[in-house]
Image: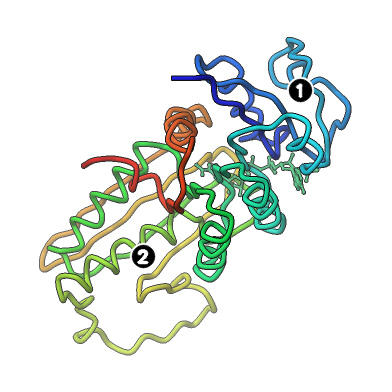
Amino acid sequence: MSIVKVIVCGSCGKMGREAIKTVSKEENLELVGAVDLDNTGKDIGLITQNQALEIYISNDLEFIISNTAPQVMIDFTAPAVVKEHIYTALQNNVVPVVGTTGLTNEDIEEINTWVHRYETGAIIAPNFALGAILMMKFSSIAARFLPQVEIIELHHDQKIDAPSGTALKTAQMIKAEQVKYGIGDASDNKPEEIEKLNGARGGKIEDIHIHSIRLQGKVAHQEVIFGGKGQTLSIRHDSLDRSSFMPGLVMAIKEAVGLKKLIYGLENLIEF
Ligand code: NAP
């Protein structure tokens, strides 16, 4: 495999730092640029791993792309800027590999039109942890057999968007399976609920309740609880530190080279 040139947007953030460390050490990947609003002009290696990499942080994505000619742009920034970054990458025939969450279904559809317009692929993965991908896949299988389901997701207290991208994707995967197999959520026998405290039952998407917890000490966790007659099934995944996301990220970067379509969800890169 030839060397893949990679830039990282959000390189000084929690995920971006982990990505810089991984890309700079990984065989067949070459870190060529670092973009962030913080620490501009500083060597990213001194910030992430106490070792100069001679790659200097810039806040100008266009400039970094035209000066380093990357094949892949990793993005771990924020919901407010990620779409603009994706557009800039696609316009310049750079494949975005996006971990930033908070994109809506409409955003994904719009990004898909850009992918076709610029004939450049994109990978958007709400969760790069392979264990989380299995948790989502197992949940979609369980949905065929147990009619009721609710999702509890737990993250650190600095997370901006709620619910998490993983919870939204899980709900979509479960719903798709329920529709495919003609399964309802068995809500026919439920009484009409009175929510005495607004939000007590969480948010609802695809008819599935999602509960978001934000606490210091947490990283990224999710439990999907299914209910059936006389039984429950809990499927849980815990990311205990941010290294859990790196093998999936590396896999996505390698798949991104030469990609010409949009992949939404890492499960679409895995043969089950
Ligand atoms: P974070 O620590 O806040 O890092 C975000 C970084 O992006 C910050 O350094 C921020 O700079 C920078 N940034 C903001 N706007 C920018 C812009 N316009 N250009 C360049 N850099 C910009 O957040 P995090 O915990 O790393 O998470 C980042 C994203 O990844 C979130 O959406 C999170 O949900 C997601 N995430 C995804 C996965 C996955 O597996 N897909 C896993 C964990 C997290 P400032 O501090 O100056 O704003």
Q: Quadrant of residue 186?
A: bottom left
Q: Quadrant of ligand 1?
A: top right
Residue 181: x and y in percent read: 14, 70
Q: Is residue 30 depicted above or below 12 in this figure?
A: above
Q: Quadrant of residue 187?
A: bottom left
Q: Earlier in the sequence, mark 1 or mark 2?
A: 1
* Amino acid type of the residue tagged 1 in the rendering: Ile
Is 60 or 209 nearer to us in this picture?
60
Answer yes or no: disc 2 within 8 Å of ligand 1: no
Distance of label 1 from label 2 (alpha carbons): 37 Å
Please tell me which residue is depicted at 24% across the width and 84% down the height of the picture: 190
> Which residue lies under the disc numbered 1?
44
- Specify the farthest residue to the bottom: 192
Left or right of 187: which side holds 159?
Answer: right
Q: Is residue 76 depicted above or below 186 in this figure?
A: above
Residue 66: x and y in percent read: 76, 37
The local secondary structure at tag 1 comes to helix
Please tell me which residue is depicted at 56% across the width and 43% down the height of the picture: 95
Q: Quadrant of residue 178?
A: bottom left
Left or right of 51: which side holds 41?
Answer: right
The local secondary structure at tag 2 comes to helix
Q: Is residue 182 depicted above or below 143 in this figure?
A: below
Q: Which mark is residue 11?
A: none
Please tell me which residue is depicted at 57% across the width and 14% down the height of the picture: 25
Q: Which mark is residue 172?
A: 2
Color style of the picture: rainbow
* Amino acid type of the residue tagged 2 in the rendering: Gln
